[in-house]
Image: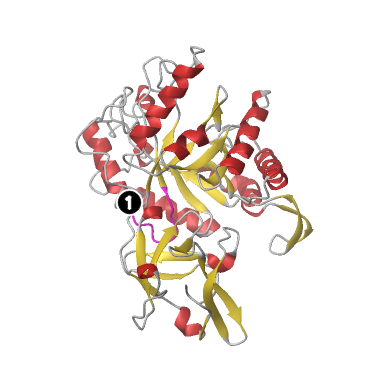
Amino acid sequence: MLGPILLGIICLVYFTIGQSIPTQQAVCYTPFHLSCYSNGNIAELTAAIDADFKIMAYTVSIVRTYYSQHYGIQVAPVAAKYNIQLYLGVYMTTESWGQVEIAAAVQAVKDYPNTILALLFGNENLYNPRLNFGTNSADDILSIATNTRRQILRDSGRWVPIGTSQRVTEWVESSIDSQTYKLANGVCSSGTSEFCSNWYYYPLDILGVNIYPFFDPNYNSNQPFALLNILWCKMVEKFGSTKIRPTESGFPSAGSAPYMAPNNWPSVDGEANYYNAMTQWRPADGGGPLFWFTAFDLPDSALAHSDYERHFGLFNIDRSWKSSKFPAWNNRASVGIQHILYTISENVLSEWNQGLWTYNPTTMQFQVAITGQCLDAYQTYNGYGLHTWLCDAWNNNQKWVIDSSQKYIRHAIHSN
């Protein structure tokens, strides 16, 4: 175990990491491809959802959902069975079953705390008057997120990151800056957003952004993530890198070209090209799990505005692989990969259990293998102290950022 180490400020600038971190691939999931989805046979649907998670576990260890349950079948136990962590969706609706969604999310955090990485409220539903798009205000989203967090705190005392997932169009839309600012900063009843003693609405911890170069006429298959980089940088410029997460991106394997990008024809090769590029994506700042939309194609009977919307899946409807070119079998998330950390003077940080740590990009924490505690940097009278401490996803002393290209880590909060 690493004991307290006092460091001068300059000594905390960088550590090197003993193994490079791959882009963390993840996938979005709904069971709407299943023929048994709405036939009333709960046992059959439960088995089918289980089979879906089994095949997804071959390629990813993080899944994003849009619902916390389906006809009373909770998602979290199935994910936990296959060692899959969740960005668990909570579908926003004013119908009575909306309370079932919230209750399932609260129960999931209580029963499966190691499975639930975050709760996401709403998807592409933020109202944009200029484009007449979306149905909900920032207050709507923050209200359900805040109330759910308070229920979780009352029931289990756990603190789980909360967020939402919206189109990049809305995030960068200047005419609704007041709405996106509110999502990022919350509403404080006492104090300021920086030093708030009583939150009316908690600020969101995760600002999920959905980016699809497929819909842009400037998309170039030879530079598949060029547009992704541009839009990601716009998000970083506006919101910083700590909270933003890439919650959707993808490319269809069949269907028509979109009317706004008539030269972007869907194909299996096109999907493979974009997917394989995404596995190599290194954002200049920030990041976290990159969620591919989506796990499975949809049947022709599924409601869709355009035919290509049914063909974004990594897998066919029947769970078969579309191509040998993707997805990668060994593309497991970096959460489970262990690393050695060295100081700049090449001393190994932590001498026990071979000095192994794991990095969680969602919480931005390094966890030591031997004790389960996290790397924690705290300010002292003449610099910073460094030790391990009980892991707390809300503790800013434990936030670290990785520069994969240089194999460095730096502190995300302290001014190094």
Q: Residue at x 58, y 60 (%)?
A: 392
- 393 displayed left or right of 336: right
Residue situated in front as seen by the camera: 324 or 235: 324
Q: Residue at x 41, y 60 (%)?
A: 358
Residue situated in front as seen by the camera: 111 or 214: 111
Work out whether residue 32 can be spotted.
Answer: no
Residue situated in front as seen by the camera: 170 or 197: 197
- 50 displayed left or right of 392: left
Where is residue 316? Give x, y as percent.
Answer: 30, 26
Residue pointed to by mark 1: 226
- For label 1, the SS is helix
Quarter assignment of residue 264: top left
Above or below, 390 relative to 218: below
Residue at the left extreme of this rendering: 324
Where is residue 389? Give x, y as percent.
Answer: 56, 68
Quarter assignment of residue 323: top left
The residue stretch that appears in magenta:
281-289
Quarter assignment of residue 104: top right
Residue situated in front as seen by the camera: 171 or 116: 116
Where is residue 229? Give x, y as percent.
Answer: 37, 53
Residue at the top extreme of this rendering: 39
Work out whether residue 350 can be spotted.
Answer: yes
Assign the magenta stretch its main secondary structure. Answer: loop
Q: Amino acid at mark 1?
A: Ala
Crowd band around label 1 with a 10 angstrom C-alpha radius: few (<14), some (14–19), many (20+): some
Q: For residue 126: magenta?
A: no
Residue at the right extreme of this rendering: 190
Above or below, 354 relative to 5: above
Above or below, 191 relative to 30: below
